Amino acid sequence: MQRLLVAVVLSAVLGTAHAGVYKWVDADGNITYSDRPQPGAEIWLSAYGNGMQGLAVAHSDAAGRFVLRDVGDGHNVGARKPGLAPSPTFDVRGRANYSQELELVLQGTGSGVRVRVVDSAGRPAEGARVRVQHVDRDYRVEGYPATTPMQRPIPYTLVCDAEGRCEASSVTPGEVEVVVSQVGLAPWKTTFELLPGRTQSLEVQLDAGVVVHGVVRSGEGTPVEGAYVLVNRLADLESRSAQSAADGSYRVVGIAAGDFEIRAGRRNGGRVEVTLSGTSGEAIEWDPVLDEGRVLRGRLIDEQGRGLSGWMVNATAGGRGWDRPSTFWGQTFSDASGEFRIVNCPDEPLRVSVIESRSRFVFPEAEFEGLRVEQGTHELRILDAWRASASIAGRLLAADGRAAVAEVRLRPANQERGASRWTDA
């Protein structure tokens, strides 16, 4: 995937009440107005495509301004400063040689969370990760028009020091969630109300949690190598996972006690999900059998009947488009003879779209409606006339006639997939 590089020019200020006047409320509830910018604010940039993780990459200068250069598209950016509530975050959008200017408004008096973590033996949990996140549904923002597109305030992802301590010093008051995780131990989570101008201290002791182990097998009873076994969402602090070895064996440690959902699967190779329950220190044996369910089978051929190898095949069911999204999506690639199979299909008609993967085009060459699993192997013929042979070029102008930098989305009529491109400067 191409990474687009842009420059972002920003300023950090206190929460606006009116244009040019900045308003904030101190710990005693007193309202203060100021037209001063905020120097020394920490500028946070998210990871690519992940608004929950990121790093502080700069600080605002005496005028409250700074520049981030060569920022890839697909990031979020925000500002925070100890004692003040952080700004909301904004998507970075653009392409090469494009500059985006944002005003990051710090939202008045903030709060803090101070955490100390120890392991099951009471020893400091050095390296434990702590996420502090504002989760209040009634999140109100000052200083921006109601129609301004923005995200929730910056979450903290902290790493405990040698004494097991860490601190978040710029947190939005209200309902806050704290999650603590350490390798090999069960995660810990709590939610509480955080008052403006106050710092909440937490003492957390992690326990061993539950262990789940076993052997992953196929429907035929064969051990499956490389299958995933996952509790909670992948890459989340509360997730625990393992991958099966050559003999199908796996072991997942540090699962939070109580009821939990655990699933096993392999890409286009079947899956299974169950709910288990355990207490801390308990070991549970679970031997998942990957169920492929209903399998859609087919073969892609050209006009001469020759198999088409390496083509992307997507199967969807249900609605199409943003207003009626699909209820099922499966993807695979045709093999050397053009054959393909998509597992765990629903008992309803499927739409199958195919894309010539070796090309740089993202529009499907063809889309077939109404395919059903029980109809047997489907032979899908791709005519030469359907294959990508054209391109679209144009120039986008603003109302004043100047070149406009914007995202252009193209989608063929009556098809669900399309392409997105950014105009140049």
Image (spheres, rainbow, N blue to C red):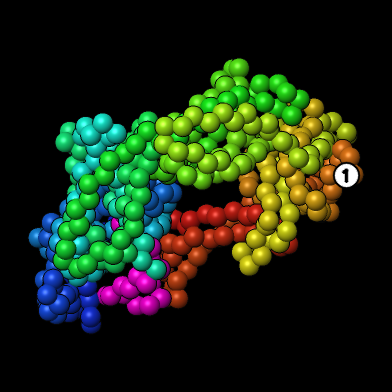
Query: Which x, y percent locates residue 207?
Result: 34, 36
* Residue visible at 23% across and 82% down in the picture: 18
Residue 240 on image: x %, y %: 46, 36
Q: What residue is at 26 percent from the left and 31 percent from the top?
A: 121
Is residue 254 toward the left or the right of residue 349 in the image? left
Is 295 contained in the magenta span?
no
Magenta part mainly helix, strand or loop?
loop
Residue stretch in magenta: 138-155
Q: Secondary structure at mark 1?
A: helix
**Residue in view at x 23 percent, y 34 percent:** 122
How many numbered discs, if any?
A: 1
Left or right, 352 with reference to 36: right
Q: Position of residue 235 (x, y in %)?
A: 44, 41
Residue beneath disc 1:
374
Seen from the viewer's position, the closer of residues 171 and 200 is 200
Task: Please say whether residue 418 is visible from this viewpoint.
Answer: yes
